[in-house]
Amino acid sequence: MELPYTEPYKIKVVESLRKSTREEREKWIKEANFNLFKLKSHQVFIDLLTDSGTSAMSDLQWAEIMKGDESYAGSKSYYKLYEVIQELLDMPYFLPTHQGRAAENVLFSTMIKDGDIVPGNSHFDTTKGHIEFRKATAIDCTIDEAFETSKYHPFKGNIDLNKLEKVFKSYPKEKIPLCIITITCNTSGGQPVSMKNIKEVSALCKKYGIKIIFDAARFAENAYFIKTREPEYKNSKIKDIVKEMFSYGDGATMSSKKDGLVNIGGFIALKDKELYDKASVYNIMFEGYLTYGGMAGRDMAALAQGLMEGTEFDYLESRIGQVKYLGDKLKEYNVPIQEPTGGHAVFVDAKKFFNHIPKEQFQAQTLAIELYKEGGVRGVEIGAILADRDPATRENRYPQLELLRLAIPRRVYTNNHIKYIAVCLANIFNKRQEIKTGYKIINEAPIMRHFTVELDKI
Ligand SMILES: *Cc1c(COP(=O)(O)O)cnc(C)c1O
């Protein structure tokens, strides 16, 4: 028999989890006004709210924490991180920032102005936020297949070249400061972008004189999908794939809280000295001096180690294998999910799951609440609550998809936890007809309402 993949590590430290009863959970979720963001972490048994900043660090990373150099200027830890970014991304300039959105804030301050157009593949919320905050417009050029949940496509994060060229033809070059390639594409479900697509987008951008900036939070997971789904890269090393991907762009913004395997941090990497010099001014103003920019020396040192571990094939195989394992279990139990599963999360199709509950009663949020009550598992709604109201009409917006996102933290849970999650969802699926109604909003903020919204059962 072929040997199955296994985790390329063993457990050295454990953190206890508290099991709760259904009665306790029903009380706690009511006290939280049926908003899972308001739960205290001890009230949650398995936390799948996000994969951001929730990774488990290795013994070698903790050793780096001790070795961190806290010098204000010229820290050894900065140079350690510099060397690693050189080796992986092959970009000569880099600025540390406290997290991904800070990298966006600094870089976009130098590149984007009022009235600009920024095409890309389904821009992440903070990325879009930093574009729109500057009165510029983000245009989504993702391929149409990304929006059909049950249709298989190996690279649902790909950019549609026709849509992109249409943008280039519709606006003058001066209005398009950059094109963003998000690897993997978070918003469309952690879906990867193929090397072929990156190459083609790069050629098109060169033709029109447009810079490419990678939103690189999950670059290593993207490289894993290239290796396993794009035949010419079957025998390539992950680190070589990473280097080739970045060779087609001009720079990157990074949230180290994802593939960096650390709890906080980010950076900007650039090829161009002039752009680096301009961004440096904003980095000093918003983040901190050039050799720490919002990060402690120890955190830069742990990140340097985390980036090397996060680009090991065996690690990626077990990480993405675990996400797929959850997807496969759910399919076995007939729970409708988005396919194929992406790099960091499984998305349950709540519209299909609760097709007897009207969308006005928030199907995905209803499912998130039921999953919490069933087993203390916390996922997050990606549906009408998140979509918020139309800024002009103030009417509720109902997106095409009502999804429950189950994001898997890196190196944190075992496959027994995963099985438990799948059984919880199967139990709810089997009694779904008994759940006849959803929820209504009783209180909401004027913007970003999902964090604080208060709900009541209908
Ligand atoms: C998380 C994320 C960001 C923002 O990074 P933070 O570290 O949360 O500020 C930007 N882009 C993508 C694709 C992300 O996943």
Image (cartoon, rainbow, N blue to C red):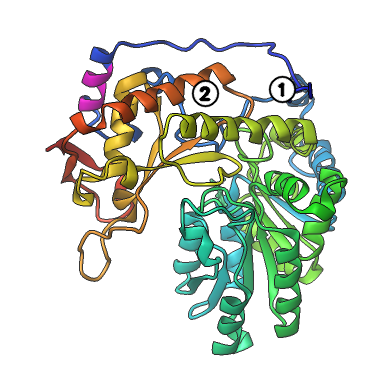
Q: Nearer the viewer, residue 152 or 364?
A: 152
Q: Is residue 399 visible?
A: yes
Location of residue 169 (image quadrant): bottom right
Instruction: Residue at 72%, 34% (x, y): give it.
Output: 317
Which residue in the structure is indicated by mark 2? 418
* SS at badge 1: loop
Whether 177 is drawn above or below 182: the answer is: below
* SS at badge 2: helix
Q: Amino acid at mark 2?
A: Ile
User: Of all residues shown, which one is farthest toward the front?
Assistant: 1
What is the x, y in percent for residue 340? 56, 46
Label drawn at residue 219: none
Read off the magenta span: 25-30
What is the x, y in percent for residue 226? 74, 51
Q: Nearer the viewer, residue 414 or 324?
A: 324
Does label 2 point to a residue whose CB lies under 8 Å from ligand 1?
A: no
Spatial CA span between label 1 and label 2: 14 Å
Instruction: Residue at 28%, 18% (x, y): give it.
Output: 25
Q: Which image quarter is the C terminus in? A: top left
Location of residue 433 (image quadrant): top left
Q: Which image quarter is the N terminus in? A: top right
Which secondary structure type mostly characterizes the magenta part of the structure? Answer: helix
Q: Amino acid at mark 1?
A: Glu
Which residue in the structure is indicated by mark 1? 7
Q: Nearer the viewer, residue 99 or 66?
A: 99
What is the x, y in percent for residue 311? 77, 39
- Numbered label tally: 2
Among the two numbered marks 1 and 2 on one chain, the one whose residue lies closer to the N terminus: 1
Q: Residues within 10 Å of mark 2 (few under 14, many from 20)?
A: some
